[in-house]
Amino acid sequence: MNTKLSLPTLALSLTVLACGNGSGSSDGATIAVVTTVSPIRNIIENVGGDRVTVRSLVPEGTNSHTFEPPPSAARHIAEADLIVINGLNLELPALELAESNKGRGVEIVFLGEATVSTGEYVYDFSFPEEGGDPNPHLWTDPILAAAYADHVRDALGRLDPGGAAYYAANAAAFRARIDLLDAAVNAAVSTIPEEQRRLLTYHDSFPYFGARYGLTIIGAIQPSNFSEPSPREVADLIGQIRELGVRAIFGSEVFPSEVLKTIADEAGAVQVDTLRDDDLPGEAGDPENTYLAMMVEDVRAIVRGLGGDAAALDGFDTTDSWVPFDEFANN
């Protein structure tokens, strides 16, 4: 998801996504955290537990590239105790807004830059190196998402030393769940026939995931300007799919596209249009409205679409991993 929106778009609103019971920081108030997309929001929730309230710039189920929210974002940023963004030039308008409106001394955490070095940046179909912007979708790699949680843990601990041990315990619990997910994903992907371990997606969101689990990313259908591909590009994709014997192509619930069916029909491939990269399943507050659930759904779709067996993911606990502060303190 490439949220290079105009400044007015991101300057307009925040969707309030609160968790907890208001019993968080040492003075009795929760820490106000502002972030951008829902996977990062949920990672922060899993680390901060009921000592934080997280406000996300982009509502669930919304195309964040074109969303036009109402005008309250600047006020919420001004009230934030901590601002967490993905970085890697994903949210430049949001960053400009944050820098202009944040309170004195409020930290802005850049998760992407803290997680990978410049030598680890991925430049690809929608993010060519000559454009200067690396692919920012680190969080679709669960191991990198666990690193995001560690950086959130450290930032919250700096802001709220009294809760540092709580944040550390929550981050450890999240990482433990990620380790289980990583093992399940590896097991599921290993069932895909080797010649079918090729991934063609509509939106260019899975390069770090593909590298982690041995899937070759052969392309992205959606051009970098979020238009539909040209007839020439469609013809080239159909030829590439036929030549490589690609079994399935993967679309997105957030980016519906009629051209996917055309490509799939002409190339003799299966169309799977349920992948998510920044839209969590269910509704806010639902137990399945989690980063873990999003990743399990995506992996199931990819593995089954490419001819593998996703049974390794059956029964995986996709609910939030954090515990209430009172429960932590009493143990």
Image: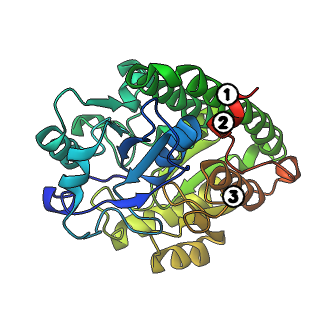
For numbered disc 2, what is the local secondary structure? helix
Q: Residue at x 60, y 41 (%)?
A: 216
Q: First in sequence: mark 1 or mark 3?
A: 3
Q: What residue sits right under mark 1 in the picture?
A: 329
Q: Residue at x 47, y 75 (%)?
A: 256
Q: First in sequence: mark 2 or mark 3?
A: 3
For numbered disc 3, what is the local secondary structure? helix
328 versus 249 height, above or below: above
Mark 1 Cα shell of 10 Å, populated few (<14), some (14-19), many (≥20): few
Out of 209 and 175, give the one closest to the viewer: 175
67 versus 160 height, above or below: below
Out of 239 and 210, give the one closest to the viewer: 210
Q: What residue sits right under mark 3 in the picture?
A: 297
| Amino acid at circle 3 | Glu
Image x and y of residue 90, in percent: 31, 44
| Amino acid at circle 1 | Ala
Mark 3 Cα shell of 10 Å, populated few (<14), some (14-19), many (≥20): some
Q: What residue sits right under mark 2 in the picture?
A: 326
Mark 2 Cα shell of 10 Å, populated few (<14), some (14-19), many (≥20): few
User: Can residue 59 be seen in the rendering of this structure?
Assistant: yes
Dot 1 and dot 2 residues touching (CB under 8 Å): yes
